[in-house]
């Protein structure tokens, strides 16, 4: 369960302050695929950075499960991100000189999982997202965009996170492949009992989400 209460983020701009996120409160149950929708500059990326513990709020609370991550120290935030939060990016962000399997294994290596368990879980996750056989040993440049995004999804799931944040996850994909990726995220949210939030400007994704939050000028508008 993700619970956000009165979340605000301000940035200094000369002598003035910019409120990128303004007094946001929301709640998303585990196992839910949700969308945050808004135009560029609406505050989507800032909100995702706060939820992903990449930045600290000016005020407010962010509960992931029973822990308020807004109050964690920097060292604890690093550990929390490593173990409890997964990220999916528009540009995939796969390491080019590693195979698909090695890309999925990497976060588990940082988390201290032994080699045999890393390989077993990575193979299972890749199979779960449709990357099978010899494709698991291919480097990203030998995979299509849709296949690279599937690898990125498997990697995000590798450490069994409570929360996965997807920033424009279909932005570099054609519409039919994008739909497949969204259907996959919806299915994985339920099967992995993970909260998955996609930030997007695409109204089509919003229609497929169980919960949708619309942002404008850093505020929830409906």
Image (spheres, helix red, strand yellow):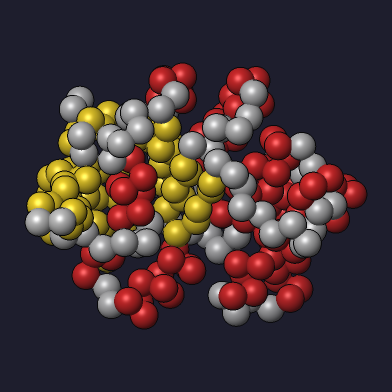
Locate residue 80, reporting x and y percent.
40, 70
Please identify the residue farthest to the right as the structure is shown.
134
Q: What residue do we see at 60% from left, 67% from top?
A: 107
> Which of the 4 image quarters holds residue 11?
bottom left
Residue 190 showing in the rendered view: no
**Residue placed at 61% from the left, 47% from the top?**
92
Q: Is residue 79 visible?
A: yes
> Percent position (x, y) of residue 124?
72, 54
The structure residue drawn at horizontal position 49% and vertical position 37%, both measured from the top left corner, is 168
> Would residue 205 appear left or right of 185 to someone viewing this image?
left
Q: How many marks?
A: 0
- In the image, taking residue 199 as reference, residue 4 lies left or right, namely left
Against 183, residue 64 (above or below) is below
Q: Quadrant of the C terminus?
A: top left
Q: Is residue 99 left or right of residue 190?
A: right
Residue 184 position within the rendered picture, expressed as x and y whole percent measured from the top left? 59, 35
**Is residue 138 toward the left or the right of residue 84 in the image?**
right
Pinpoint residue 8: horizontal percent, then vertical percent. 16, 51
Q: Residue furthest left?
A: 15
Q: Residue at x 41, y 20 (%)?
A: 203
């Amino acid at each position: 369960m993700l619970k956000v209460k009165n979340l605000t983020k301000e940035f200094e701009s000369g002598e003035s302050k910019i409120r990128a996120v303004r007094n946001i409160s929301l709640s998303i149950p585990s196992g839910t695929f949700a969308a945050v929708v808004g135009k560029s500059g609406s505050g989507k990326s800032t909100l995702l950075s706060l939820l992903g513990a990449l930045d600290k709020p000016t005020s407010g609370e962010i509960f992931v499960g029973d822990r308020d991550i807004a109050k964690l120290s920097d060292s604890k935030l690093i550990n929390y991100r490593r173990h409890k939060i997964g990220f999916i990016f528009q540009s995939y962000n796969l390491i080019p000189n590693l195979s698909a399997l090695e890309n999925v294994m990497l976060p588990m290596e940082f988390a201290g999982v032994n080699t045999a368990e890393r390989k077993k879980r990575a193979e299972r996750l890749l199979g779960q997202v449709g990357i099978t056989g010899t494709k698991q040993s291919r480097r990203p440049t030998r995979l299509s965009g849709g296949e690279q995004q599937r690898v990125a999804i498997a990697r995000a799931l590798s450490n069994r996170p409570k929360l996965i944040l997807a920033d424009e996850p279909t932005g570099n994909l054609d519409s039919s492949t994008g739909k497949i990726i969204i259907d996959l995220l919806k299915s994985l949210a339920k099967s992995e009992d993970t909260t998955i939030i996609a930030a997007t400007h695409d109204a089509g994704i919003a229609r497929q989400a169980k919960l949708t939050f619309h942002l404008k000028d850093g505020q929830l508008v409906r």
